[in-house]
Image: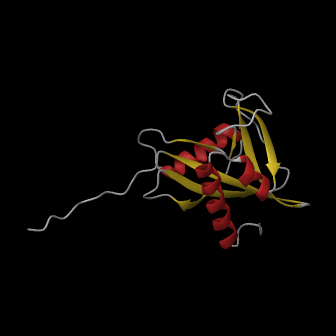
Amino acid sequence: MTTERITTPLRPSGAMVAVISQSPDGPRYLLLHSAEYVPGKAGDWEWGPPSGCIEPDEDIATCATRELFEETGIRGEPQPVATEDIGWALFFLNVPWGTAVRLDAAEHNDFAWVTFEDACRMCRPERVAEGFRIAVEAARMSHRGPSI
């Protein structure tokens, strides 16, 4: 007797958006500083890209768009990178250099446009940095993003 296992795709718990801009000095990536941390005190979850949890009955693309706007004031349509069978969906969005960032003070107390190397170093824990790297690589491969 064989038993077939029926599995359903894992529904993401939320979404992360790698926000990319081409500065005069090369590509820069938007990171947000958590309001739960005192600036300068390093730790997991201190810095990261815009992200947040999905709401009931919300699709993952809507989650990414909503979280991006709530956390940064940036309106746009993040491009999907990984949205199925993953715990946290990955997106990217290219914005013009000089795009205004408006923080939700309850969630974030600072932001920075940083190099790829700095972003990878600042994003912690490692799974956040890995998701960020995957999203940036997808942007680069799509020809809609800058070279790293």
Name the residue located 76 percent from the left edge and 28 percent from the top edge: 38
Does residue 135 appear in the picture of this structure?
Answer: yes
Which residue occupies 52% across, 53% down?
89
Which residue occupies the extreme left position in the image? 1
Position of 117 relative to 55 (above/below): below
Image check: 61 left or right of 57?
A: right
Q: Quadrant of the N terminus?
A: bottom left
Q: How many marks?
A: 0
Residue 78: x and y in percent read 62, 55
Residue sitting nearer the eye, 58 or 47: 47
Q: In which quarter of the image is residue 26?
A: bottom right
**Residue beneath the point at 79% across and 53% down:** 118
Between residues 114 and 50, which one lies in front from this camera angle?
Answer: 114
Q: Is residue 78 visible?
A: no
Residue 126 in the image, given as x and y percentages of width and height? 62, 50
Q: In which quarter of the image is residue 23?
A: bottom right
Q: Which of the colour schemes (rainbow, by chain, secondary structure, one colour) is used? A: secondary structure
Q: In which quarter of the image is the C terminus?
A: bottom right
81 left or right of 35? left
Who's the residue at 60% across and 48% down the image?
Answer: 65
In the rendered view, does 8 fall on the left or right side of 53?
A: left
Q: In this view, does 10 lie to the left or right of 110?
A: left
Residue 108, position as x, y percentages in the image: 71, 33
